[in-house]
């Protein structure tokens, strides 16, 4: 058989052989490249996440706490995110984001080849990886499934995932996933949460310049933070506006107006700052029941008993009351100095400054300069000046008590938009206060303050601190006696007495070191006389009194010693306040509670709490005791509260050396307890009784709590079944109070 090349000239035959070999070589090379590429893709995609999971994907969402009117009072989250739908993101925000991040988002299939080629060329030209070519879909794939490193391996996986996502989901679905997932600085994830954080409004209400500002943040949340770097953020915002103009999304006039608009933020107040001690109690409970992951990532909805308005009133009452106490005892502050700690005034930041300040609030401020008769301060973005007149209550020269770099405590009088503020000089010597308010009918806790400053101390003095209750324990003694048939008009002898105890004779005294002789039980309680209370406790037995306290819900272990009758027992403010609600409730105890309902992310009810009710004492006893505690206010140690425009009753309490000051009382609808003292149980100072230190706080709160509401009235006590000996001593004698 003849060769195919026999008829050809020798030169042409040689050329064709060379071409054939080249073609064969190219085919081999192409096959090798295809095989290598296939192999690489196989390697890079063997562990590639499945995008099918996105169909059921639910991003980590915050657990929110609501008050009894549906207002947000706190949240728990690892990532602060509010999940929103596509229509919740306004067109202006969608246009801004697409214009600056991915102009062809609605046209490409997940990757933009021309953008990748251009970025690669610029990378080679610059000698480094400086150009990004990721589409929104690729960014979504990276954020959801991959690490942030910039390796070739990750880029291939990112591309493959983006293609899969585009095949399985619509553009609106992809945009929604991205807009809910992206990090936007300061612990905020997603544009809905960012809008609420930076502008205190939902994304639907964003203006052009606000939308452009947010759209510019994903490029670098730290670099373009409008809080820390407003100049950079504004330049980035204007770049976004220019991109929107180039894409025809806005007119030249709209662009010009938006670019010239100042950068104005309306930072949302930290909702957790309103009732931090209350929120902490709920967090501990929820984590114990549902687990930390569910609480911080599961998007629970927790409906509580708290009332925002009453909580604000409680916060203000406690802080104002402590400020009044501090001023009564003069200037004794030994202020910290930031410069002594090696910090600079310019860079110093106090935890108080994390939240936007409010008028009438109290914050720590750093002294920026101090001279004769004037000192300048700063707190956050605000600056203020103090004059000698502002420090008059200290009875010292301003320049002697405030030095540059000192950290002082002030009350905010006014705030101006330009950052100017007026403040008054206050003092924080360490004195603490706590307040609890409970609705009688439901047992719902309406307000709770666990201390002066949660940032400084998270120890909850309302629920965790066991403190001696002083004479506020005496109502349990009188309840025991009345429940066993006595009348408030029965009499008892107030005279020197000694009791034999296991440790020897016990000779108590009254607060005023005087004795009134024969007095009624009503007067003995109103005037907080010690001797009558001890005689009554001795007669019925201190163990019986302790048993009665248990009926009221007191769970603290009380030793069976006679001085317990005068309040040597240690009880929490929460228990003591809840116990007092038995009196106006006609003897019924409603257990206090924080939570009314908890639902999951999808709205399913996980738990619902109803009032837990049980009988504690008889209706007769409860009404008589209410009337006797009303006498404490009208003619006894709590007489200052008689000027309130609605009926109240209650009892003061003071312990030895004035270490604890109490007032626990109630109106016909609400019980409230207040405690004032130092954590280390040192003296508050001479004459700092419950009536002097705690009662003003109680009155301030109750005035707000009852404002505009129908006050109601207490149920009248039943008539006594027998005549009692009366005394001519008037019930309007000067009120005194006993420290046991």
Image (spheres, rainbow, N blue to C red):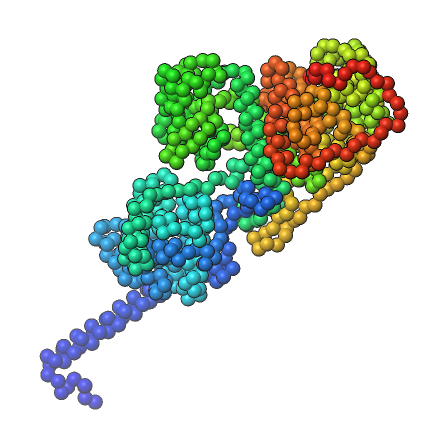
Residue 504 placement (x, y as % from top left): 78, 11
412 and 63: which one is in front? Answer: 412
Q: Is residue 732 left or right of residue 403?
A: right
- Quarter of the image with the N terminus is bottom left
718 above or below 245? above
Confirm whether residue 152 shows in the render.
no
What's the residue at 47%, 13% (across, down)?
A: 395
Residue 239 placement (x, y as % from top left): 29, 50
303 above or below 313? below
Total numbered circles: 0
What's the residue at 26%, 60% (across, down)?
A: 117
563 and 426: which one is in front? Answer: 426
Q: Quadrant of residue 544?
A: top right
What's the residue at 71%, 40% (across, down)?
A: 441
- Quarter of the image with the C terminus is top right
Confirm whether residue 414 shows in the render.
yes
What's the residue at 36%, 30% (across, down)?
A: 347
Toward the bottom, the furthest residue is 1
Q: Is residue 186 left or right of residue 624?
A: left
Q: Is residue 154 left or right of residue 281?
A: left
Q: Quadrant of residue 437?
A: top right
Q: Quadrant of residue 574?
A: top right
Q: Is residue 695 left or right of residue 403?
A: right
Residue 170 placement (x, y as % from top left): 43, 64
Residue 8 placement (x, y as % from top left): 12, 85
């Amino acid at each position: 058989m003849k060769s195919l090349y026999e008829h050809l000239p020798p030169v042409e035959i040689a050329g064709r052989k060379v071409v054939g070999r080249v073609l064969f070589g190219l085919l081999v090379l192409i096959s090798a490249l295809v095989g290598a590429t296939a192999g690489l893709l196989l390697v890079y995609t063997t562990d590639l996440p499945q995008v099918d999971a996105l169909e059921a994907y639910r991003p980590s969402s915050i657990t929110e706490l609501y008050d009894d009117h549906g207002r947000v009072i706190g949240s728990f989250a690892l990532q602060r995110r509010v999940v929103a739908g596509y229509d919740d993101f306004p067109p202006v925000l969608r246009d801004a984001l697409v214009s600056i991040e991915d102009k062809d988002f609605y046209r490409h299939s997940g990757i933009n080849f021309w953008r990748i080629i251009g970025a690669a060329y610029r990378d080679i030209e610059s000698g480094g990886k400086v150009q990004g070519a990721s589409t929104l879909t690729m960014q979504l794939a990276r954020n959801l499934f991959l690490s942030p490193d910039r390796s070739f391996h990750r880029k291939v996986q990112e591309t493959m995932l983006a293609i899969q996502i585009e095949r399985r989901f619509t553009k609106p679905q992809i945009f929604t996933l991205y807009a809910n997932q992206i990090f936007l600085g300061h612990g905020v994830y997603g544009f809905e949460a960012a809008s609420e954080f930076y502008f205190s409004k939902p994304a639907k209400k964003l203006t052009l310049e606000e939308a452009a500002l947010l759209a510019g943040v994903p490029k670098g949340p730290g670099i373009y933070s409008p809080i820390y770097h407003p100049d950079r953020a504004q330049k980035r915002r204007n770049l976004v506006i220019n991109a929107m103009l180039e894409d025809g999304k806005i007119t030249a006039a709209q662009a010009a107006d938006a670019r010239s608009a100042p950068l104005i933020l309306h930072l949302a107040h930290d909702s957790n700052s309103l009732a931090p001690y209350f929120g902490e109690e709920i967090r501990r409970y929820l984590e114990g029941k549902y687990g930390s992951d569910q609480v911080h990532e599961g998007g629970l909805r927790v409906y509580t008993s708290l009332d925002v308005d009453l909580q604000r009133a409680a916060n203000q009452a406690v802080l104002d009351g402590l400020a009044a106490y501090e001023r009564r005892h003069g200037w004794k502050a030994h202020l910290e100095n930031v410069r002594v700690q090696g910090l600079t005034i310019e860079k110093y930041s106090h935890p108080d400054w994390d939240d936007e300040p409010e008028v009438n609030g109290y914050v720590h401020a750093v002294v920026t300069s101090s001279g004769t008769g004037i000192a300048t301060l700063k707190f956050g973005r605000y600056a203020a000046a103090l004059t000698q007149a502002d420090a008059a209550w200290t009875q010292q020269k301003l320049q002697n008590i405030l030095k540059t770099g000192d950290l002082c405590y002030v009350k905010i009088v006014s705030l101006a938009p330009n950052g100017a503020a007026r403040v008054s000089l206050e003092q924080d010597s360490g004195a603490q206060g706590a307040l609890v308010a409970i609705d009688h009918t439901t047992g719902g806790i309406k307000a709770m303050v666990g201390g002066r400053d949660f940032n400084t101390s998270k120890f909850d003095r309302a629920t965790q601190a066991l403190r001696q209750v002083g004479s506020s324990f005496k109502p349990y003694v009188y309840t025991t006696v009345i429940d066993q048939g006595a009348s408030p008009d029965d009499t008892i002898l107030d005279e020197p007495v000694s009791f034999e105890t296991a440790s020897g004779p016990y000779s108590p005294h009254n607060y005023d070191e005087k004795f009134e002789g024969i007095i009624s039980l009503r007067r003995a309680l109103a005037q907080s006389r010690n001797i009558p209370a001890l005689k009554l406790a001795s007669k019925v037995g201190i163990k019986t009194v302790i048993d009665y306290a248990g009926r009221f819900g007191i769970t603290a272990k009380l030793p069976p010693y006679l001085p317990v009758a005068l309040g040597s027992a240690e009880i929490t403010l929460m228990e003591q306040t809840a116990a007092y609600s038995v009196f106006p409730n006609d003897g019924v105890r409603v257990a206090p509670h924080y939570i009314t309902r908890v639902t999951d992310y999808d709205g399913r009810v996980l738990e619902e709490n109803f009032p837990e009710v049980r009988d504690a004492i008889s209706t007769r006893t409860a009404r008589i005791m209410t009337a006797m505690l009303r006498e404490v206010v009208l003619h006894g140690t709590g007489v200052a509260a008689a000027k309130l425009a609605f009926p109240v009753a209650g009892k003061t309490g003071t312990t030895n050396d004035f270490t604890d000051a109490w007032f626990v009382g109630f109106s016909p609808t609400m019980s409230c307890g207040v405690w004032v003292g130092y954590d280390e149980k040192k003296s508050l100072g001479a004459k700092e009784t419950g009536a002097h230190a705690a009662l003003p706080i109680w009155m301030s709160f109750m005035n707000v709590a009852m404002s505009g509401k129908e006050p109601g009235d207490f149920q009248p006590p039943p008539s006594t079944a027998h005549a009692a000996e009366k005394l001519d001593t008037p019930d309007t004698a000067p009120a005194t109070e006993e420290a046991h």
